[in-house]
Structure formats: structure tokens, C-alpha cells
Image: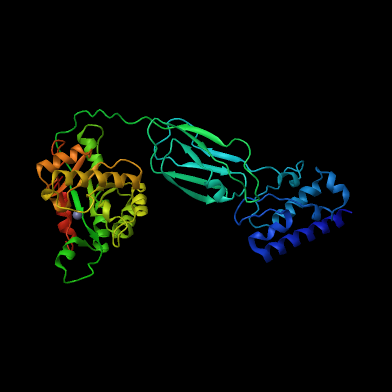
Amino acid sequence: MIGRVAGQIDRIAMAVLVGALLAGSAGFTMLNQQPVSAGMPTRVVISPDERSGLPPSMLTTTASPTVAAAAAATNMSVPAGTVPATAPPERPSFAVARVAPHLEAVEPKTSGVGVYADVVMTFSEPMNRPSVESTFDIQPKVEGRIVWSDDFTLRFAVFKFAYATTYQVEVRGRSLRGVPVSGSRSWSFTTVSAPPDVLLPGPPTTNVPILTYHYIRVNPNSRDRMGFALSVTPADFAAQMDWLARYAFHPITTEDLYNNLGGARGLPSKPVILTFDDGYADFYTTALPILRSHDFKAVAYVVSGFIGWPGYMTAAQIREADRSGIEIGSHTVSHVNLAQSSAAAVRAQLVESKQAIERVIGHEVVSFCYPSGKYTSAVASQVKAAGYHDSTTTIGGYSHTMSDRYVWARLRVSGGEPLDQFAVAVNTAF
Ligand SMILES: [Zn+2]
């Protein structure tokens, strides 16, 4: 009798194996009427058809070791199976298939959550993605994007939460089997308080080389002298970043410098600021991967009216750069000469570019850079009035103060500059 049952089990296991091989990851549906995706936890379900092939005693004697053996044998035939050998025999998988999908884990659920935390939901079974996405809701509203790790796990990658705010999250939807989510579908969490915004007096002067880059590319036209001077080749740029890393320089942002001069926070040793003017596409395609490989921060000054134009970063690329720790600053709407614009035109360039970029990245824009370094003291005052914290120029230098923060000096990195010349320029500040 036992031998005959074992033979049955072997045949069932073989049928499952053959089915799985024939139909790939979907092969298992013939057994349990439930789609199973490759690499995902699988619940072993013995459907009535297969069960009917077993002696009647096995259908009711759920604690029988042979049932466990059947489960184990069936499980062995499924490469992605994760059912433990001790699968609870008192709950024949039959019933499991009828449990509605539910949230197994959500995060965050606490207070003191960081403003860049992701919201993560893990479901008990593979979900119909559009049905979940269309029902996902977070209040108050916050910008972010939805990313599925797999059919079980949804991540809402937020651009930035507000400080000291309680968010209410709710999600519904249905499983791939079409069963609506049951059980608890909403939860809340609270973000940390903002750092103090009353700035104490900081150091009178901070020495930080602010390096100016434009294109990171091989200049396409060898007779274009201007283009050559503005283009640092990817190889030279990579060598410069390697050099900064080897000699323990620490790239910071202009906002870090502003906060340091305001007394709000210290700076790492040997700080340096890497700025990229104009928002060219090669910042995203070429510079950003090199910066990321060193975990370097940088500042990209974007011309809001050029976003998405050929040769310029798209809104999505700017958002991703922002999420990678790049500070996105404004470089006006249309790269005009502000020193020769009317006060109203200057104001429009400052305010409209700030608002446009804020819509793209989902949080405040506080850094500015004068196109071609052109400004007047009246323009600098307007930069302040528009709500920016600081602005950079094309004036050469590396000493910065709080009071000259709307005319911060920079060091230009030109195309073809030898590495030792770069090293001397950066080292001069220390
Ligand atoms: Zn520019």
C-alpha cells in the first residue's frame, strides 16, 4: 500500500516537473489554477484532480506523513519553490488558494522617518500592477514614482517628504487572480522635524574651490575653439574625479557651503564643489555615472526653457540626478544676459525658472548661476529677492563669505587642461 502510494506520488511529481519544463514558469498553473511567476515564492496547491488520484484516506488524514512527503516531492519538482519541508499539513494547500491577497509588510510605519525614505508595500501574492498603482494614495500629496521590485513588492520612491508631517497611505487593487486585497489597507507615518532654520553665525570665510564645467564630451568639431575650451573629455573628467578621490577631497553642494557659512553645519575635510552649467545631456549620460561611481555630490545649473531640447537633459533625467544627490540649481529660463535685461525681465527669468525646475524635482530650488557670468548689483539683489540662497559667477577665486554669497567665485576647468594643472588649481585653496 505504501509502496503504491509512493509510486503515485512519484508520478505526480514527474507530471509537475514535465509540466513545468513544457510550459516554463507558467507550467504550474496546470496544478493549482494560479499563475506563478518565476523566482517567486510558490504555494503548493494540490487541486481536486490530482487529489482524486490518491487513496481516499489521504484526502482526510491531513497529518499523515505521506501527505507531507507528497508536498515535499511536489515541491522538489518546482525549481523556484520555497515551501518548507515542514509545510503545515493541517492546512491542505487547497484552502490557501482561497485566502484573499493582503499586505504582509509595509514601511515606514513609525515617527521620525527621514524625508527621503521610500514607501514599501509587500503583498502576500503576485498583484495586478495597474490595479494597485491606480489605487495607491498618499496624503498629503507628495511627488514620487512607483517602482515594482517584483509582482509582490511595490516601492514608492518619493522625491522628498515634508518635515514633521504625518502621511496617510492607502492601497487597494487586486491580485493576478483577480481577488481584491483584504485586511488592513492603510497606515500612517510621521517624518522628522526640520533642522533649525535660524542660522547661527558661521565662519567668516570658507575656502572651497567651486569648479566650473560645461560639456563632458569629446568636442565634436575640432575647429570649434570655444567648444573645445568648454568640453572636458570623459577620460580627463574621470581622471580628475579619480584624483579628487585619491587625495581625499570631498565634493559638497553650494547649499552645504551656504549652511556652513550660516553656522548650521560643518564641512568635510578638503571640500570642493563641482558645478555643471547649462544642463547638457552629457551631464546625465557621462558625468553622472562617473560622479556616482565615487559617490560624489555636484551641482547642475539647468536652463529651465531648454529642458528636453536636443542635447539637454530631459525632466526625467533631471529628476533622477536630483534623486542621486545632485543639487539642481537655476541658470534662468533662456540663458539671457541678465546685466542687459530690464528689472521685470530679470525677475521673470529668476522666478519662472525656479518654479519650473521645482515642478520637475518636487522641492525647492535655492541655487542660482548667472548665464555667462553676467550680472549687476541690482541683478544680485533680485536673485536674493526671488528666494535663492546663493549664486555663482565666472569670477576666479575660492574664498567665500555669507555676505558675498550672490557673487561666489569659481575656478573654471577648461578642455585639454593637464591633470597636474587641475591639481594645482584645486590645491591652491588649501
Ligand atoms: Zn551657461
| Image position of 80 (left or right of 98) | left
Q: Residue at x 63, y 55 (%)?
A: 80
Tell me where residue 226 appears, x and y as whole percent.
15, 64
Can residue 262 be seen in the rendering of this structure? yes
Which is nearer the eye, 278 or 152? 278
Q: Position of residue 137 (x, y in %)?
A: 50, 40
> Residue at position x 11%, y 41% from top?
378
Picture colour scheme: rainbow
Examine the rendering and report whether any part of residue 268 can be seen. no
How many numbered callouts? 0
Residue shown at the point (59%, 40%) measured from the top left: 103
Asked where in the image residue 198 lies, by quadrant, the reply is: top left
Q: Give residue 68's position: percent from left, percent from top.
A: 76, 48
Q: Nearer the viewer, residue 96 or 180?
A: 180
In this image, 365 relative to 229: left or right?
right
373 vs 48, nearest the viewer? 373
Image height of 30 relative to 133, above or below: below
Q: Is residue 291 left or right of residue 166?
A: left
Farthest-out residue, right: 1
Q: Is residue 15 above or below residue 143?
A: below
Q: Residue at 21% across / 47% down in the picture?
A: 349
Pick the quarter of the image with the C terminus: top left
Image height check: is 391 above or below 264? below
Residue 130 placed where, x, y %? 55, 50
Which corner quadrant holds the N terminus? Answer: bottom right
Regarding ligand 1, which quadrant of the image does it lie in?
bottom left
